[in-house]
Amino acid sequence: MKNIAIIFSVLCIQLWSAQNVYLTKVEKTNDNTDKFLYKKEEATADAIYLGEVEVQGFSKDDALVFSLVYKKAKEIGANTFQLKPFENVDGTPQSFNPANYKIALYYTTKEKLAPKHGEMYIFASSEKDQKISINRKDYTISPRSFVKLKVIPGEVYTISTRKLLGSTVKIQPKANDDNVYFQISSLKVKPDNSGVGGLNLKSGDIIGLEKSYAEFLSAIYTESKL
C-alpha cells in the first residue's frame, strides 16, 4: 500500500506539472524553409497572420516548452510570433500567466525583419535568484526575469557568476553585431542537437542562447531594470 501511495503521489505531481501546447487556430499556412522563430515587433508591417497556439500548464523546462511551440509553428509555416493576452470582461488585457497563455503566429518576409544589434540580454533561470557581476558591478536577477544592456562596440564586457568556482565570460561586440543572449543557471544543461532553441556556448553556468529561444524567453520572462 505504501508503494502504491508513493506511485500515486508521483503521478499527481507529473500531472500537475504537465505541459500541453495546442494549435488552436489555423487561418492559413505558408510554405517556407525558415528555421528561425523570432519575436514579432509591434511596428512590423505586412506580417501574415497564420494562426495561434495555446500553452496550458506550467513547466520549469522552458526549452521544452519552446520546442513544442516551435514544432506547432513550423506545422503552418510561421517564422515569427507574438504573445496574445487573454482579455478581461471589459476588454482589457489580463496579466501574463506562465501556466496558460496564447501565442499568435505569423509569416514575415526576411526583408521586413529589422536587424537587432547593440544589446546584451542576460536571463535568470526559472527557479531561483541569480547573482552576477557585469564589469565589476553586482546585480541580482529574480527567477523568470532578465536584464538588457546597451553595449558599446569595441568595449570589453566581463560577465561573472560571483562564485568560488563560478564562470566568467568576456565579449567584445563589434559595430552592427547581432544582439547577444546569455542565461545564468546553476543547473546542468544539455545541448539541444535539434538545431532549434539550442545552446551555442557554455562556460560552466553561463550559457549562450540561440536567438529564437532567447526571444521566446524575452516574451515570457519579465524585464528587470538595472
Image (tube, grey):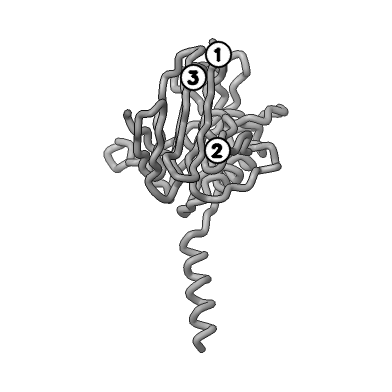
Looking at the image, is mark 2 or mark 3 earlier in the sequence?
Answer: 3
What residue is pinned by disc 3? 156
What residue is pinned by disc 2? 207
Q: Between residues 117 and 31, which one lies in front from this camera angle?
A: 117
Estimate how packed mark 3 is, as few (under 14), some (14 to 19) or many (20 or more) residues with alpha carbons within 10 Å: few
Q: Between residues 71 and 225, which one lies in front from this camera angle?
A: 225
**Left or right: 200 in relation to 98:** right
Looking at the image, is mark 1 or mark 2 earlier in the sequence?
Answer: 1
**Left or right: 152 in relation to 28:** left
The answer to whether any part of residue 50 appears in the image is: no
Instruction: Look at the numbered discs 1 and 2 and tell me whether their residues touch, using CB distance below 8 Å.
Output: no
What residue is pinned by disc 1? 174
Between marks 3 and 1 in the image, the one whose residue lies nearer the viewer: 3
Instruction: Look at the numbered discs 2 and 3 and tell me whether their residues touch, using CB distance below 8 Å.
Output: no
Q: Residue at x 45, y 45 (%)?
A: 164
Find residue 8 and report its horizontal and vertical position in percent: 51, 77
* Amino acid residing under circle 3: Val
Q: Residue at x 56, y 45 (%)?
A: 63
Quadrant where the image shows the C terminus: top left
Task: Give me the C-alpha separation between circle 2 and circle 3.
Answer: 18 Å
Number of numbered tags placed on the structure image: 3
The answer to whether any part of residue 119 appears in the image is: yes
Estimate how packed mark 2 is, as few (under 14), some (14 to 19) or many (20 or more) residues with alpha carbons within 10 Å: many
Q: Is residue 178 above or below residue 127?
A: above
Estimate how packed mark 1 is, as few (under 14), some (14 to 19) or many (20 or more) residues with alpha carbons within 10 Å: some
Q: Residue at x 52, y 54 (%)?
A: 19
Find residue 88 and report its horizontal and vertical position in percent: 31, 42
Find residue 68 and report its horizontal and vertical position in percent: 60, 46
* Amino acid residing under circle 1: Lys
* Amino acid residing under circle 2: Ile
Q: Residue at x 50, y 86 (%)?
A: 2
